[in-house]
Amino acid sequence: MARKSKKQRNAEQAVRQQSVRDEAKARRRPSRDDLARVLLWQMITAAQGRKDARLALDKLSEAIVIDLERQGFDVRESEIVFEDLADRYSDGLFPFRPKWHLKPRPIVSQPGC
């Protein structure tokens, strides 16, 4: 049996991946990125609620930046991104846009039922 072309394999993979995304959406399953965003927000807002908030944020930033550096990211750029997020999250408000496709749809009663 001849091997499929790269173009054909990529097309089939795109179909499979779209199916996985559609199923996750139907099941209202959060992605790894959804969990990571919420966790980071919770960690930053919890650290800001402490008496030693600056120290707690510095420790959190250092731990995250070290791991990002291991992945090949620039240290200073990673620190800038963390500080920007910490500043944005500092008001404690939930910063994420609603995912309207996950909201329950209102039940509309049919006339005469």
Image (tube, helix red, strand yellow):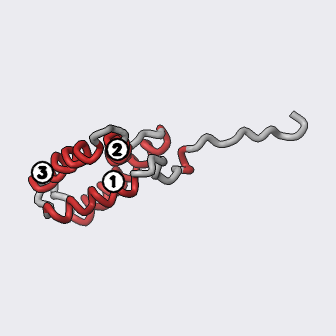
Name the residue tied to disc 3.
66
- Do the numbered discs 1 and 3 sit on residues whose CB atoms are within 8 Å? no
Give the mark, 1 or 3, whose residue is nearer the N terminus.
Answer: 3
Quadrant housing the C terminus: top right
Residue 50 horizontal side relative to residue 71, left or right: right
For badge 1, the amino acid type reads Ala
x 28%, y 58%: residue: 83
What whole-number distance in Å separates the C-alpha atoms at marks 2 and 1?
Answer: 9 Å
Q: Give the SS element for disc 2.
A: helix
For badge 2, the amino acid type reads Gln
On the image, the x and y values in percent for residue 9 come to: 25, 58
On the image, the x and y values in percent for residue 7 come to: 25, 66
On the image, the x and y values in percent for residue 2 come to: 16, 58
> How many neighbours does mark 1 have within 10 angstroms: few (below 14), some (14-19), or many (20 or more)?
many
Q: Nearer the viewer, mark 3 or mark 2?
A: 2
Name the residue tied to disc 2.
48
For badge 3, the amino acid type reads Ile
What whole-number distance in Å separates the C-alpha atoms at marks 3 and 2?
Answer: 21 Å
The disc label shown at residue 86, or none: 1
x 50%, y 54%: residue: 97
